[in-house]
Amino acid sequence: MISVVVPYKNSAKWLRRCLDSLTNQTGDFEFLIVNDHSDDKGPVIAASYTDDRFRLLDNERGAGVSGARNTGMDHARGEWITFLDADDEMLPGAMEIFEEVLETDANIHQLNHRRRLRQRDAMKYSNNGGVYGLDALPDAWWGVWNKLFRAEFVKDIRFDEALQYGEDGMFVLECLAKDGRIHHAEHDLATTRHRFDNPKSLSKSKTGFDLVKQAKAYVAFLDEHPEMCRVIAVEMVKIWERALEKFTTSSTS
């Protein structure tokens, strides 16, 4: 079984589209839909799905996406776990893709990732198939929405609930500290749309303070795992280049 963890908070505008994309899947799935203290109609929408593969949960951990994902992981029963955001959708035929991907022995499997741009899809992160190590990780190694994690492998790993941005990167770093390999398969997994139709998504509403907290978390992790220096240094450079561009633009507009 594959467990799909979907946290949501005030996502009523997009949640039905996301859950429809799950309902249309065939295969041995369970969908853990985690309410992260929503105060809109999201819980009503989630409750309207009667597919017995859906399990509706309330965030039992710290408020925020990290706590909601951790709640989902705490309740997951599948041999594999993946994550989907409430404003995204899973492409049709996911189980067939997963079954092919899992033929390769690995604890972490990554797939290609499409992003919805208005009325068309565009490839955002695409890598050559194969097993990547710490010396040369694939693009989007830090994401969790494009991966399958072996449940037994991540049973002692959880998202940092002190972070509201960069928590996915920290989670993957913890995984890489246990096994410094990612298997990448050349298949499309999901389509994200929040870049253009959800202006309040976390990736678009991060602040400078969020980035500083992320950087501090990376540095603290590096103290314990110096072998990850190159990976973290490369990622931090990218993070701060994007931040400089964003905040420079906003300050001059």
Image (cartoon, rainbow, N blue to C red):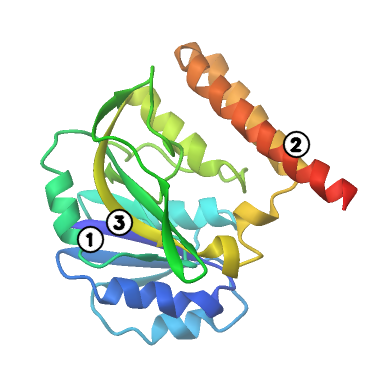
Q: Which residue is mark 3?
A: 76
Residue labelled with disc 1: 94
Foreground: 111 or 47? 111
Q: Residues within 10 Å of mark 1 (few under 14, many from 20)?
A: some
Judging depth in this view, the residue of 248 and 148 nearest the camera is 248
- Tell which tag, 1 or 2, sits nearer the viewer: 2
Tally the numbered discs. 3
Residue depicted at x 62% and y 78%: 39
Question: Along the polypeptide, which appears first: circle 1 or circle 3?
Answer: 3
**Dot in front, 3 or 2:** 2
> Circle 2 — which element?
helix
Among the 4 quarters of the image, the one containing residue 126: top left
Task: Tell me, yes or no, whether the two marked residues, 1 and 3, touch with CB atoms within 8 Å.
Answer: no
Q: CA distance from mark 1 to mark 2?
A: 37 Å
Q: Answer left or right for 46 relative to 213.
A: left
Q: Earlier in the sequence, mark 1 or mark 2?
A: 1
Which residue is outermost to the top?
226
- Spatial CA span between label 3 and label 2: 39 Å
Tag 1 and tag 2, C-beta contact below 8 Å: no
Q: Is residue 210 visible?
A: yes
Looking at the rendered image, the quarter that the N terminus falls into is bottom left
Q: Looking at numbered disc 2 in the image, what kind of residue is underneath it?
A: Leu
Q: Position of residue 159 (x, y in %)?
A: 49, 43
Q: Are marks 3 and 2 in contact (CB under 8 Å)?
A: no
Instruction: Examine the image and state in which quarter residue 27 appears.
Output: bottom left
Label 3 packing within 10 angstroms: few (<14), some (14-19), many (20+): many
For numbered disc 3, what is the local secondary structure? loop
Q: Which residue is mark 2?
A: 244
Q: Secondary structure at mark 1?
A: helix
The amino acid sitting under disc 3 is Ala
Residue 57 location in percent, x, y? 42, 69
